[in-house]
Image (cartoon, coloured by chain):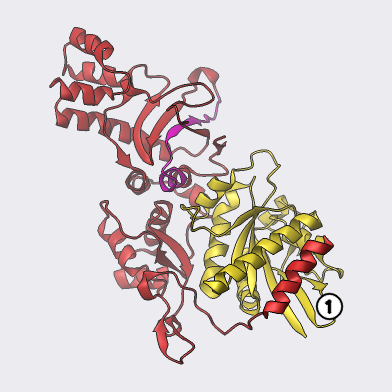
Chain colours: A red, B yellow
Amino acid sequence: MGIRGSLETFSLPELFQIIGSGQKSGRLRFTPHTKLDDPQNKTTFELWFKRGFFVTIINSNQYQDLIAKIQEKAWIDAMVLVKNKYLCPADKPFGTYLKENNLLTEAQREWLFDQQISQVYKLFKIKDGSFNFEEIDQSNKIASDGEGFPVREMTGKKRKITELSLAAMRNLSDWSRFVEDIPRAEMGLQQVAKGYDIHLTSLEKHLWSSANGSISLKKLAQQKEVDLQTLQRTALSMIFAGLVEEMTVVSPAEQFISNSSGELRPAFANGSNTAIKSKAKPKASKSLISNLVSFLKDNF
Amino acid sequence: MEIFKIVITGNVGAGKTTLIRTISEIDVVDTDRHATDETADLKANTTVAFDFGRITLNSEQLLYLYGTPGQSRFDFMWDILINQSQAYVLLVAAHRPKDFRGAKRILNFMNRKGDIPMIIGMTHTDCEGAWEADDVLLALGFADRETSPPLVQVNPEDPRSIAQCLVVLLEQLVTTAAA
């Protein structure tokens, strides 16, 4: 079983978040819908992921894209390239093999991977399309068709999905399909990741460090003297990247709640998302819970 | 009189009102009104305040069930209800991925307002396009099944299925209390 749907019901960044947070390995087939829906013009993209990392993209209209790009650049003699294509072990990314054999430099491999990444950025701009994500099984194959990782199209480089998604969202100009997802101005942010090991912009860093649920996006925008809409969009990108989550703002005074000894303690001690209890709830007796369980088991 | 109060929350169309109507011993006191916004695409009427149902255990003990409105503009009602309750069930329609973010928003709100035991009730699991439980959990932000709240499949039209769901919730309450 996989995840199947359309961009109308689930967006690419949300899908990326699931693949990343679930550390999934597999193939995401994505078919953009053209207005004319011309079958001759139908391109399908295959994005491959390994343990939550993006590893390659294949465009159905561009056969042997990796080899074609190397030939375009004339980095390797055509005959040598073809020969090495057959010599490359079936479980090794072609880019890694060429690098190990001193046929490709690290900079060239990096350039090839950047070309693939830029194709992913373009996909994030597509408004309408269908997708199907299928996981790799224990034998390293897609169960439905037995396909394995496309090593001939792999550079051997990988990119963390969080980083990829965040960068793709930064490149977005049309946000119309995310209108319902944009966090409201009165909402705050709360860190949900333990930390980050990817590059963040100055605004993203500011949002990260302010994400303790005590300040609204509106106030943050005023403080930082940033356009509110820009801030809200950045917040959504960080939500999709799994770094923060939107939260109802609780004032600093409310962040101190009484414990049983009457002491005040911070509600976010240890950085955990401890709930703010506005009032003590009545405790249910053991007898009530026990009777309730018995009633539900015996009467339905 | 001892009363145990459970909130049933979730997006519009997740099955909250149906669940309470199915299991309540009294005619559910509902506050459904004709939907005039995007909710009308899903159902003709929607809850604007809350649904209320009751189960009498004995002469001294009762269970109250409160169903929240699904739309976030009524979140003041979520606040009121969660502060009155001892546990809650978040209903998520497995075949409607578009609503997963909304469900996550409700989850964040509830967890922020009330540190009380909860479980996820996955509905519509037999519908076309229904997601697997693990993927629904990921969409709700639970990457680790070990630490995620219990998730049960529940049919809001089946009293037995609802009873089993509520038993899991009560077991969760006992586990949380013991911890």
Residue with the mark numbered 1 = B58
The foreground one among B95 and A249 is B95
Magenta-colored span:
A16-37
Q: Position of residue B114 (x, y in %)?
A: 56, 74
Left or right: where B25 falls relative to A54: right
Residue A79 falls within the magenta-colored stretch:
no
Q: Position of residue A125 (x, y in %)?
A: 42, 40
Which chain is mark 1 on? B
Q: Position of residue A128 (x, y in %)?
A: 52, 37
Which image quarter is the N terminus of chain A in?
A: top right
Q: Amino acid at mark 1?
A: Asn
The foreground one among A8 and A76 is A76
Residue furthest top as drawn: A79
Residue B151: quarter of image: bottom right
Residue at the image point whose x is 72% and y is 77% from the top: A288
Secondary structure of the residue carrying tag 1 is loop
Q: Is residue A243 above or below residue A253?
A: above
Q: Is residue A3 above or below residue A21?
A: above
Q: Position of residue A212 (x, y in %)?
A: 38, 71
Residue A151: quarter of image: top left
Q: Is residue A108 visible?
A: yes
Q: Mark 1 Cα within 10 Å, few/some/many (few <14, many 20+)?
A: few
Residue at the image point whose x is 65% and y is 54% from the top: B152
